[in-house]
């Protein structure tokens, strides 16, 4: 069976500027994800669960594993001089990384949500890591600037997630389809388990936090009712973990749609455009699905700031189309 390391090397020549740099970057993410996986797996055993006394940029309490995961990916990508820029949901601002060696200037920036769904950590429910990669647009002899991070999602050269679930799986795309690799924990090796992933032909799962129902836009309220009514004609069912990576992954494998509309607490939706919506949207489209903010394609949004939020409707293409229509006509 093919390993992730072998797959990365074999497919290196697909990239437009193939020098091995993107392969090194993906390998660094692979390594860091194993360290995070190890830590997540023993969360119940050691005194590591629970909150720190620190808050992140969005004034949310940081969990200890959030901080650990952020450090692990930072160490893998920055200390080893793999990237020229790094931005994280857990950092206030982006980090520009200068190269000590003029002959080895790096060209890629990484944006990451190191531990998504972290409110699930203390209750032993699956969490994930989401990453997004862009090629820098500032000249390589200058430090990266905000513009390198605020590119449209359509400019991503790679995106992926790691789901620390009943098994640990790494899914990624470089724009040539989506492939999934499951970790063999005994060997510490990811193996190609889900080649060329596509959404099933007809989805029937909708994933949304219905606790916020009264605050949803009219179109979303009606869409939920449409899914609930007339069961025999429309065999929809609801599933919601509350961890984007888990919810998206289930819908990718089994067929369904994920919704996070605007709410009273989050008028622009809860999810972050750069760390969550863009990478998940890139993967969704590469798997034959769709992702919109209710009207427009997520990947066409011009970001204005690093931590901006955005509504997300993502998954099975025809279900996303239905949601957009409900929003338009209600
Ligand atoms: P986080 O990045 O702070 O963990 O927040 C994002 C998470 C998503 O994984 C999940 O889909 C969503 O928040 C759940 O939100 P809610 O609890 O409002 O349903
Ligand atoms: Mg998150």
Image: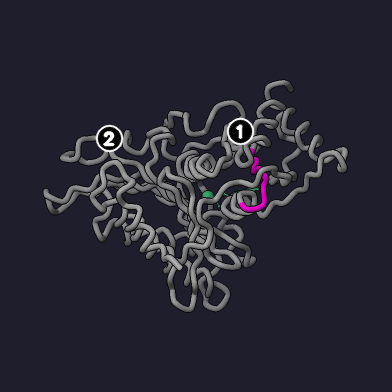
Span of residues in magenta: 253-260
147 w.r.t. 92: above or below: above
- Asked if residue 175 is among those painted magenta in the image, a careful observer would answer no
**Helix, strand or loop for disc 2:** loop
Left or right: 187 with respect to 235?
left
Q: Determine whether the beta carbon of the residue marked 1 sits less than 8 angstroms from the nearest atom of ligand 1.
A: no
Residue found at the far left of this picture: 102
Q: Which residue is mark 2?
A: 137
Tag of residue 1: none
| Residue closer to the observer: 234 or 130 | 234
Q: Residue 256 in the image: x percent, y percent?
A: 67, 45
Where does the C terminus fall, quadrant-wise? top right
Residue drawn at x 54%, y 63% is: 164
Tag of residue 267: 1
Left or right: 124 with respect to 106?
right
Q: Residue 275 in the image: x percent, y percent?
A: 46, 45
**Quarter-wise, where is residue 329 in the image?**
top right
**Helix, strand or loop for disc 1:** loop
């Amino acid at each position: 069976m093919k390993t992730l390391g072998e797959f990365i090397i074999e497919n290196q020549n697909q990239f437009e500027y193939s020098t091995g740099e993107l392969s090194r970057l993906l390998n660094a993410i692979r390594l860091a994800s194993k360290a995070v996986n190890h830590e997540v797996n023993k969360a119940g055993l050691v005194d590591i669960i629970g909150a720190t006394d620190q808050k992140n940029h969005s004034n949310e309490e940081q969990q200890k594993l959030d901080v650990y995961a952020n450090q692990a990916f930072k160490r893998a990508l920055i200390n080893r001089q793999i990237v020229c820029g790094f931005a994280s949901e857990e950092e206030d601002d982006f980090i520009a990384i200068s190269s000590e060696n003029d002959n080895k200037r790096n060209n890629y920036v990484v944006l990451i949500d190191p531990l998504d769904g972290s409110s699930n950590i203390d209750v032993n429910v699956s969490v994930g890591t989401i990453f997004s990669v862009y090629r820098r647009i500032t000249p390589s002899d200058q430090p990266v600037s905000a513009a390198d991070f605020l590119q449209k999602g359509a400019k991503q050269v790679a995106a992926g997630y790691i789901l620390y679930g009943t098994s640990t799986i790494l899914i990624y795309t470089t724009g040539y389809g989506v492939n999934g690799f499951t970790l063999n924990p005994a060997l510490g090796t990811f193996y190609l388990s889900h080649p060329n992933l596509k959404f099933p032909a007809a989805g029937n799962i909708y994933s949304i936090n219905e606790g916020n129902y009264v605050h949803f836009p009219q179109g979303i309220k009606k869409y939920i009712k449409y899914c609930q009514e007339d069961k025999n004609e429309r065999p929809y069912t609801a599933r919601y973990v509350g961890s984007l990576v888990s919810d998206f992954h289930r819908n990718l494998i089994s067929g369904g749609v994920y919704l996070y509309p605007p709410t009273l607490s989050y008028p622009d939706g809860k999810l972050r455009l750069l760390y969550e919506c863009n990478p998940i949207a890139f993967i969704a489209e590469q798997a034959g699905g769709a992702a919109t903010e209710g009207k427009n394609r997520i990947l066409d949004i011009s970001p204005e700031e690093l931590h901006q939020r955005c509504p997300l409707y993502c998954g099975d293409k025809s279900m996303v189309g239905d949601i957009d229509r409900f929003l338009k006509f209600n």
